[in-house]
Image (tube, rainbow, N blue to C red):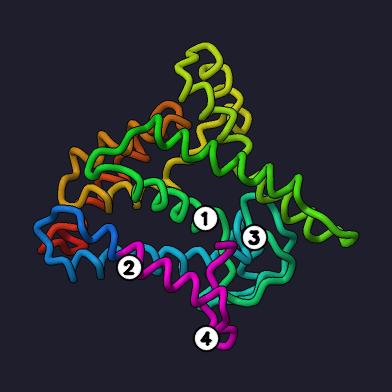
């Protein structure tokens, strides 16, 4: 899945694939033991995935912009808009996408859901998460090597697909291999060694996989956020815990 397309005017095969993935994912996760009914759990998962993708699509055209620049260019953002901006590994992968294009915020949720569906829930193995990520990175390298043709666009997109996970893979590999020194070195270099709160990209999926059990979701989120440092790791775990709490039968924004 390259991007979500939420614009009803651009319905096509790609959108049908995305919708099929959303439905199948929600149905698969709905097998988890929870105090919610199967239909309630399914609806919450579907809402999490679709709502997140819509929010991502709304923010994608102006991601990383200053508020003042957004106001000058767009005014108040209240709807989906086209992606008139340069592609990037963490952003969109194609030039001038129609309204509904998304970024790594959505890609990370898909990658994490695909990983979660390989696990014996509600337990999530952090080494398996690292392995899943490395496998995806190797697949993207293979895709780049197999790219053919004269036009540059396919190569540019293949490079971005590979570059999306390169920082993560350099941390994941020594973590998976129990190489403490190499892991510490890679973690210090991850996006320049900054506190990036990277785990927030996938934390909601972790919470959804551990419904109605914030403490366990916190523990699972903390274990899977091996890219984060300092209190950023705690933030990832808290995001997973808060999502898990939202999967209580009578959960409301205030309770």
Q: Earlier in the sequence, mark 4 or mark 3?
A: 4
Which residue in the protein does label 1 denote? 107
- Residue at image mark 3: 92
Q: Residues within 10 Å of mark 3 (few under 14, many from 20)?
A: many
Tell me the quarter of the image containing the N terminus. Answer: bottom right
- Given residues 177 and 166, the one toward you in this image is 177
Residue under numbered circle 4? 8
Which SS class for mark 1?
Answer: helix
Residue wearing tag 2: 46
Crowd tier of the residue under label 4, counting other residues whose Cα lies within 10 Å: few below 14, some 14–19, many 20 or above: few
Is residue 142 within the magenta segment?
no
Q: Are marks 2 and 1 in contact (CB under 8 Å)?
A: no
Q: Residues within 10 Å of mark 1 (few under 14, many from 20)?
A: many
Q: Quadrant of residue 178?
A: top left
Sooner in the amino-acid sequence: mark 4 or mark 1: 4
Expressed as whole percent of the image width and height from the top left, the position of residue 173 reads 53, 26
Magenta part mainly helix, strand or loop? helix
């Amino acid at each position: 899945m390259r991007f979500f397309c939420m614009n009803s005017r651009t319905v096509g095969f790609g959108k049908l694939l995305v919708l099929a993935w959303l439905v199948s994912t929600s149905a698969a996760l709905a097998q988890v033991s929870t105090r919610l009914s199967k239909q309630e759990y399914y609806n919450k998962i579907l809402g999490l995935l679709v709502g997140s993708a819509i929010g991502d699509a709304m923010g994608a055209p102006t991601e990383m912009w200053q508020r003042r620049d957004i106001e000058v260019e767009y005014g108040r953002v209240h709807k989906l808009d086209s992606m008139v901006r340069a592609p990037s590994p963490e952003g969109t992968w194609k030039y001038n996408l129609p309204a509904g294009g998304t970024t790594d915020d959505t890609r990370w949720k898909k990658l994490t859901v695909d990983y979660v569906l390989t696990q014996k829930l509600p337990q999530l193995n952090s080494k398996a998460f690292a392995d899943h990520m490395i496998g995806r990175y190797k697949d993207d390298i293979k895709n780049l090597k197999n790219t053919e043709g004269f036009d540059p666009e396919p190569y540019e997109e293949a490079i971005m697909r590979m570059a999306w996970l390169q920082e993560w893979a350099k941390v994941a590999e020594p973590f998976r291999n129990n190489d403490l020194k190499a892991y510490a070195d890679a973690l210090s270099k991850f996006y320049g060694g900054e506190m990036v709160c990277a785990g927030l990209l996938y934390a909601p999926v972790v919470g959804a996989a551990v419904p109605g059990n914030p403490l366990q979701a916190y523990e699972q989120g903390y274990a899977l956020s091996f890219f984060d440092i300092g209190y950023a790791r705690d933030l990832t775990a808290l995001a997973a815990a808060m999502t898990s709490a939202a999967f209580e039968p009578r959960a409301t924004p205030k309770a």
